Amino acid sequence: MNRRRALTVLQVFVSIACLLWLWRQPEIHSGLLRAVARAEPSWIFCGILLAGLVIGLGIVRWQFFLRLQGIRLTWGENAKLSFIGAFFNLILIGTVGGDAVKILYLMRRFPQRRSQAVVSILMDHLCGLPAVVTMYGVFCLARWEWLSTAEGLSSQLALFAGIYLAVSVVGILLLFITAAFGLTERTPRRLPLRQHAIKFSQALSLFLKHWPVTLAGVGLSFLIHWLYFATFHTASLAMNAHVAWLDIFTIMPVVDVITTVPVSISGIGIRETLFESFLHQLCQVPREIGVMISLLGFGFSVFWSLAGGLLFPFYRPASPDGHAETLRSVIHQARDLPPEEDTRSKNGDETTDGVAISPKLPERFRS
């Protein structure tokens, strides 16, 4: 069993184990139907709208980085590809999902800008880290005395989330420094993950060079995370839980960080366990209501992901020769492209300000 398959098995096991553990609690499985019956439709509608805004602002942010890399997608193409990517993030078990779909499409559509396609995705993700770190500091650290009153694993995970963010920030700062002084490429060739570190640090240098776009992306990330956290507060309002928005925003950075660790399927199971524990211990919310708030908040995003699934079979993106093809066909053709070195032009079009990054695609797309 290879590492990717082992990770998939682990994700399925963790998600199922968490959900079964929750279901075995009598107050949860007996109260879920009653909790659904008391939901307020108007707040559910508001939650769906907020989740739509999250995806919409994500489209704008990615467009910034696409244009920075010289990739000219229309707003309509960007939106369709983003919704379809959200769908694949939902249905593909693993760590890449929708990102791989978008990269494969861009590789086929813009074969001379394959490296730039990967960099645009990488920059889109990285600019969200300052928002997460700041919101953890503003809400979690500022209210640590309240947050730490949670007992057992919940309290430990809150601390783990802070350590995880701190290590991530330190690691990225080190890569910034090594990229600025060209030290990464001088590391021993047998160093583990050396090639990934080189690609990552070179991409980071673009943030400094194009700082106005970086600031715009980070600013959008703050708004995206604020709205995303607000969808779960809206879910609490829909369930008549009367949880203060400040409490939800204090819990959410911890939940957000923990669910990004790829040990479950899209955070399913772990998210519900955390909400059930935190809301019950800190806000005296019934356990079944805490689970429903988590499921409903996640469901708002799932709604738009499923919209991307409805769009996928009918999407006919244009190929480089101008002919319309199915997205499935585009993805399959992108898998068969020769290695990046074979398509690099003599005038250096295949690099991004000196950065050459070859996308390492997941096995499910290469086999």
Image (tube, rainbow, N blue to C red):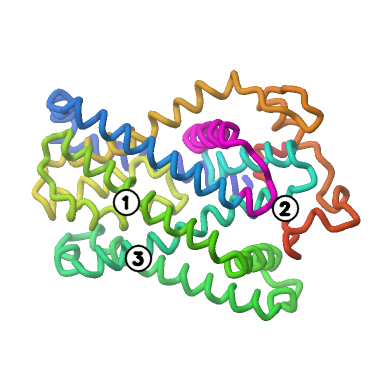
Q: Amino acid at mark 1?
A: Trp
Give the vertical position of 34 relative to 271 (above or below): above
Circle 1 residue: 226
In the image, residue 292 lies in the stretch drawn in magenta:
no
- Main SS of the magenta part reads helix
Q: Regarding mark 1 in the picture, which secondary structure is present there?
A: helix
Give the quarter of the figure containing the C terminus: top right
For the record, the magenta segment spans: 66-91
Q: Regarding mark 2 in the picture, which secondary structure is present there?
A: helix
Image mark for residue 115: 2
Q: Using the numbered discs, state the Cα–Cα distance from disc 3 to disc 2 in whole angstroms.
A: 30 Å
Let me know if residue 6 appears in the view. Answer: no
* Quarter of image, res 313: top right
Circle 3 residue: 134
Q: Position of residue 53 (x, y in %)?
A: 38, 39
From the viewer's perspective, tell me whether residue 207 is left or right of residue 199: left
* Quarter of image, res 151: bottom left
Give the vertical position of 169 relative to 186 (above or below): above
